[in-house]
Image (cartoon, coloured by chain):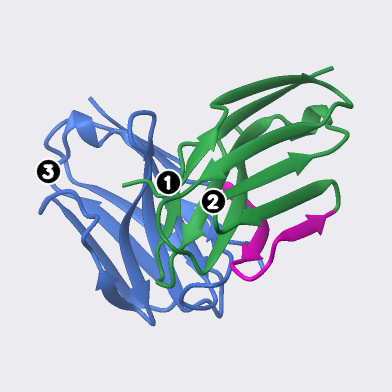
Chain colours: A green, B blue
Amino acid sequence: SQQGEEDPQALSIQEGENATMNCSYKTSINNLQWYRQNSGRGLVHLILIRSNEREKHSGRLRVTLDTSKKSSSLLITASRAADTASYFCATDANDYKLSFGAGTTVTVRA
Amino acid sequence: DAGVIQSPRHEVTEMGQEVTLRCKPISGHNSLFWYRQTMMRGLELLIYFNNNVPIDDSGMPEDRFSAKMPNASFSTLKIQPSEPRDSAVYFCASSRETGGTEAFFGQGTRLTVV
């Protein structure tokens, strides 16, 4: 079963705009990770945020985590056409299993 | 490092045939995962190995599915006999530790059972 649920399911933005997507989960976690999947390719790890962290940055990516609300958000600033992909959150609930959500499909229009 | 290597990239087979998917994890990684991705069910964890030992195969859908890891650099996922509902993209992933670290995914094997 999927632990995380992303919202929205799909997002279409203009190049240069920011893209925000959210992830909600059900159980306590050790960490939460975001992955990107380009069409026809494998998943690529973007960023990991631990349960005792509230915000993390990596380049144009900003991730927040609110453990009280069991939610996380991923912000991509100044989007580019190359950011067009599906984005997945994955939760690590103190075991080896990474449980993935259904993903958010992001389309960046030139 | 070349990353996680899966073969074949695409497989088309007839119902009832045996299918074997292969995976070479990143050298030095001691955890290996097999996932299945479909539109209906998303990404599902099938089985997890740690130090070549299967730790949890509760995600394996049926007895038709089996997985092995004879050594640290090779794993197989076998489906026998295959059925049309097994059509999916199968991913292998590896990581350095058990939990708490990122997983590195292969490019996947797109399986079509006709």
Q: Earlier in the sequence, mark 3 or mark 1?
A: 1
The residue that label 2 is drawn on is A69
Q: For numbered disc 2, what is the local secondary structure?
A: loop
The residue located at (86%, 52%) in the rendering is: A59
Q: Chain of mark 2?
A: A
Q: Is residue A49 magenta?
A: yes
Q: Position of residue B83 (x, y in %)?
A: 16, 34
**Front position in the image: A79 or A40:** A79
On residue B8, which mark appears?
A: 1
Q: Position of residue A57 (x, y in %)?
A: 80, 57
Relative to the observer, which residue lies in front, B82 or B31? Answer: B31
Q: Which mark is residue B81?
A: 3
- How many neighbours does mark 3 have within 10 angstroms: few (below 14), some (14-19), or many (20 or more)? some
**Image mark 1: chain:** B
Magenta segment boundaries in residue numbering: A43-58
Q: Residues within 10 Å of mark 2 (few under 14, many from 20)?
A: few
- Host chain of mark 3: B
* Quarter of image, res B32: bottom left
* Residue B6 visible at all: yes
Residue A103, compared with residue A94, is above or below; it is above
| Residue A52, image x, y percentages | 63, 71
Please give the name of the residue rendered at 31% of the width and 47% of the height, measured from the top-left corner.
A1
Q: Pointer 3 and pointer 2: residues touching (CB < 8 Å)?
A: no
Q: Residue at the spot x=61%, y=62% of the render?
A: B3
Disc 3 versus disc 1: nearer the observer: 3
Identify the element where label 3 is drawn: loop
Amino acid residing under circle 1: Pro
